[in-house]
Amino acid sequence: MPAMMRHFRAEYDLYSLYGDHMTASAAVQLASVRLITEDIPRLVRFYQALTGATPQYLTEDFVELVTPSATVAVSGSARVAFITADTPRAGANSSAIVEFLVEDTDAVYKRLATEFGDDLDVVQPPTVMPWGNLSALVRDPDGSLVNLYTPVTPEAWQLQRNRTPKPPHAGR
């Protein structure tokens, strides 16, 4: 099948799975999530332990941890001081969950528990969710919710195979 036809077939397959709930354009892609903090080293340490990514200090108060699918950026509040209305504040997030597809939720959860001990704020230990993901929910050091998940049912694997990032061992 020619590449162009495979591309349209892939879009059709995704559309048939998601219907009107999918954006058909690849022109907009999530590139990064930036977290504002008053303690850059502490937050960078957490996300480095979680992702295994090497922190890239672009400046002393702006750090990126690049993962295969998106970047976790960490910066100090001075970087956003120019926003005068509803200035982003460290530790003020109560409406978002940063989600990470991981190969083994139990293993990552245990690694974080070992690394941070009692300082790891566990909201929900590894639990199978109704949609078929094994999910552990923790808070980062600034209180942002972080979900670690692995598809564990055939339906969850199928759903993730049609998303980015692709699941590890996508052939399941």
Image (cartoon, rainbow, N blue to C red):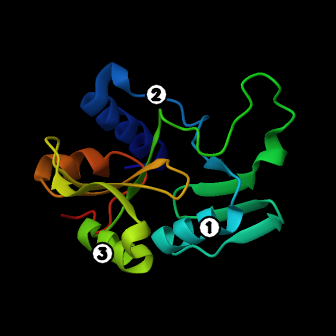
Question: Could you tell me how far apart the alpha carbons at marks 1 and 2 are, in whole angstroms?
Answer: 36 Å
Q: Which residue is mark 2?
A: 23
- Give percent across and percent down for residue 14: 33, 36
Position above or below: 170 against 37: below
Residue plotted at (28% across, 63% down): 170
Which SS class for mark 2?
Answer: loop
Badge 3: few (under 14), some or many (20 or more) residues near its Cα, within 10 Å? some
- Give percent across and percent down for residue 142: 56, 52
Position of 95 with respect to 124 (left or right) is: right
Q: Amino acid at mark 2?
A: Thr
Give the number of the disc on residue 42.
1
Q: Which residue is mark 3?
A: 110
Q: Amino acid at mark 1?
A: Arg
Residue plotted at (70% across, 35% down): 88
Q: Nearer the viewer, residue 170 or 126?
A: 126
Residue plotted at (80% across, 40% down): 80
Q: How many marks?
A: 3
Q: Earlier in the sequence, mark 1 or mark 2?
A: 2
Q: Amino acid at mark 3?
A: Lys
Q: Foreground mark, 3 or 2?
A: 3
- Give percent across and percent down for residue 85: 77, 22
Residue plotted at (46% across, 69% down): 50
Q: Nearer the viewer, residue 149 or 42?
A: 42
Which SS class for mark 1?
Answer: helix
Badge 2: few (under 14), some or many (20 or more) residues near its Cα, within 10 Å? few
Badge 1: few (under 14), some or many (20 or more) residues near its Cα, within 10 Å? some
Tell me whether circle 3 and circle 1 mark residues in contact (CB < 8 Å): no
Which residue is farthest front?
118
Q: Earlier in the sequence, mark 3 or mark 1?
A: 1
Q: Earlier in the sequence, mark 3 or mark 2?
A: 2
Give the quadrant of residue 125. bottom left
Give the number of the disc on residue 51.
none
